[in-house]
Amino acid sequence: MPLTHQPYIIKDVLVQYMRATCDTLLPIVEVSDIYPSSDDVVSYGVYVRNVSPVSREVNQGGVTSQGQVYTVTDQFEILYVSYQNDPQSIFVLGTINDLAANKTLLDGYYEVTFSKSEVIGNRSEKHTYTFNCKRLDFND
């Protein structure tokens, strides 16, 4: 099976990236590779969802050169569950925000965008980042 059809980045690399920052904080912010379902009660920490392709479209460059070139969008989510006025949140959220500009970690993607949603509760905060990474893919 050719590797070109798989995402260029895997969840384990994202978890290691987040742990590099979160393990240095006191208290340590736990990073989990098990993403909770929507009805789970989640505790304080960072959760990373699997990277998966969400779309594959014919690339305009491939059409004009009569090739089989596609634009693939890989998507993953990072969830940060915190409490209000958490002193660690500036470091954790900064690390997540910086991920979109990390050319080494996201090598091979020509466009990386993310959206962020926040849910502020009575004492808790949930920050969900959805990353969309575009890459070129070729038929065998």
Image (cartoon, rainbow, N blue to C red):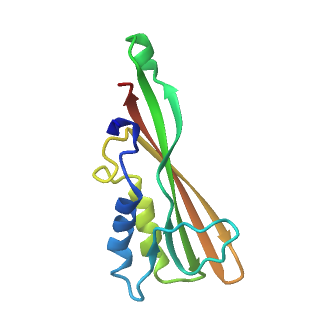
Q: Nearest the camera: 22 or 67?
A: 67
> From the image, which quarter does the N terminus lie in?
top left
> From the image, which quarter does the C terminus lie in?
top left
Instruction: Judge left or right: residue 90 versus residue 41.
Output: left
Residue drawn at the location 40% of the way across and 42% of the way down:
6
Question: To which quarter of the image does residue 105 belong?
Answer: bottom left
| Residue 55 rendering spot, x and y as whole percentages | 54, 36
What is the number of callouts on the image? 0
Residue drawn at the location 37% of the way across and 41% of the way down:
109
Residue drawn at the location 55% of the way across and 81% of the way down:
44
Does residue 76 sit above or below 28 in this rendering? above
| Residue 54 rendering spot, x and y as whole percentages | 54, 41
Instruction: Judge left or right: residue 128 versus residue 41.
Output: left
Task: Specify the farthest residue to the left.
Answer: 104
Task: Specify the farthest residue to the bottom.
Answer: 27
Does residue 27 sit above or below 79 in this rendering? below
| Residue 21 rendering spot, x and y as whole percentages | 35, 73
Question: To which quarter of the image does residue 138 belong?
Answer: top left
Instruction: Judge left or right: residue 54 versus residue 23.
Output: right
Q: Nearest the camera: 43 or 25?
A: 43
Instruction: Judge left or right: residue 60 versus residue 39.
Output: left
| Residue 117 rendering spot, x and y as whole percentages | 62, 60
Q: Nearest the camera: 20 or 34?
A: 34
